[in-house]
Image: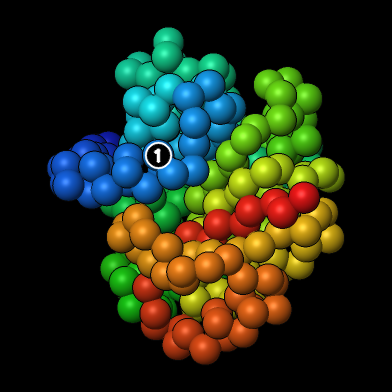
Amino acid sequence: MQMKTRLDTAAGLARSLAIYYGQPWRRQALRRFYEGLVSPGDLVFDIGAHAGSRSKTLLSLGAQVVAVEPQPVFADLIEKHFAGRLAGFERVAVGAEVGEISLRISSRHPTVTSTSRRFIDSVRDADGFRQVRWDREITVPMTTLDLLIERYGRPDFCKIDCEGAEADILRGLSSPVRLIAFEYIPAMPSVTREAIARLTALGDYRFNRVVGEKHQFINSGWKDAIAMLRELAELPPASPSGDIYARLES
């Protein structure tokens, strides 16, 4: 069994590296997209850094990057290849409070590893997830965005990609950040609604979104929370996931 798990983990890591690093045109599109959002010297939090592809792109733009990744296979990869270039690296989960949390790992599909039981229960029968099995569970330390800010400073941009834990992570933030991006999953609309509600409680935010890995905004202008929620409510549950960007207006 241990040998099978090791083989599955190696295959899963290889698949992730192929997805994130094997398509240079997508990396170039991401760099062009981030150039419009991030300036040299900006402090950026990469929450859910996975294989480090976003951190690498942000570093290439001159940003100071704090990467956070609790999954051992990805954390080892980042520590080996990026840690010396990062402003900080944390092998922890991020959530609403300090403590410990169960991390449910898919050895074959490590990018959908999650701390959110709600995420796993919601998507396991959805298109694109039927072949996924969360076959391991470990306990990892958990911190909050507030404590990361206390340690490293307030980021100019915070990217969150944690498979259904986005709203929980934002509950651990008590004051606004200039620009935040978090993953949305149409099959889990409640998490997105909770995340947007949390942000609007913190400040005057406007919203836009990106579908999948296209690295371009869907809307020509930024929308208020009501308009964005209305737009998202029209998406069928089988629609592809993407990222919502929240920009503080004042």
Quarter of the rendering containing residue 166: bottom right
Outermost residue to the top:
84
| Total numbered labels placed on residues in the image | 1
- Residue 65 spot, x, y in % from top left: 51, 26
* Residue at x 49% of width, y 65% of height: 209
Q: Who is closer to the viewer here, 20 or 97?
A: 20
Q: What residue do we see at 52% from left, 89% from top? A: 234
Residue 144 as seen in the image, left or right of residue 240: right
In this rendering, is residue 232 above or below 104?
below
**Quarter the N terminus occupies:** top left
The x, y position of residue 128, in whole percent, is 31, 71
The x and y percentages for residue 227 are 64, 79
Apparent side of residue 102 relative to residue 120 in the rendered image (left or right):
right
Q: Horizontally, is 109 left or right of 105 in the view?
A: left
Q: Is residue 60 positioned above or below 1 on the image? A: above
Measured along the vertical axis of the image, is residue 179 above or below residue 80? Answer: below
Give the SS element for disc 1: helix
Residue linked to disc 1: 35
Residue 60 pos. (x, y %): 35, 25
Specify whether residue 7 is in view.
no
Can I make out residue 197 in this image?
A: yes
Q: In the image, what residue type sits under mark 1?
A: Glu
| Crowd class of label 1 (few under 14; some 14 to 19; many from 20; radius 10 Å) | some
